[in-house]
Image (cartoon, rainbow, N blue to C red):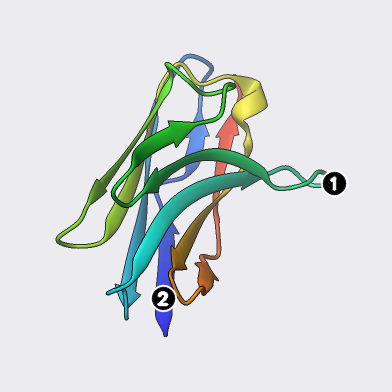
Amino acid sequence: QVQVVEAGGGLVQPGGSLRLSCAASGRLDRLSRMVWYRQVPGKEREYVAGIYIGRGAEYADSVKGRFTISRDSTKNILWLQMTSLKPEDTAVYYCNVVTYGPEEYWGQGTQVTVSS
């Protein structure tokens, strides 16, 4: 079993920055990828960025150049550094952990609100 816990959300002004974290624990010996998604009420969950083990990082076009995803492989912590935040970045951000089972696990989400 794998546990996933996100943290770091909050309220920030447009143009500001936040760093989200995702801590994964449990059986992660066959880890495939760790991915950030976000969701606004009434809309589908949207892909943000992901780290694909052995392949690297990928980003949605909407966040390229503003967000940076990184991973501490020794501790299985995933980070999302968000800069130049816009009101349209407001959402609940979720961390998704996928193994080669394949099995996938989700955290409870962390709210990011960009508003003046």
Vertical placement of residue 51 versus 63, above or below: below
Residue, disc 2: 3
In the displayed image of the protein, which residue is found farthest to the bottom? 1
Residue at the spot x=43%, y=19% of the render? 66
Mark carried by residue 42: 1
Residue at the spot x=40%, y=78% of the render? 2
Say whether residue 54 is left or right of residue 109: left
Mark found first going from the N terminus, 2 or 1: 2
Q: Position of residue 108 (x, y in %)?
A: 55, 65
In the displayed image of the protein, which residue is found farthest to the left? 74
The N terminus, quarter of image: bottom left
Vertical placement of residue 1 versus 10, above or below: below
Looking at numbered disc 1 in the image, what kind of residue is underneath it?
A: Gly
Vertical placement of residue 48 versus 83, above or below: below
Circle 1 — which element?
loop
Residue at the spot x=37%, y=37% of the render? 57
Q: Position of residue 112 (x, y in %)?
A: 55, 40
Q: Residue 15 versus residue 2: which sits nearer the camera?
A: 2
Q: Estimate how packed mark 2 is, as few (under 14), some (14 to 19) or many (20 or more) residues with alpha carbons within 10 Å.
A: some
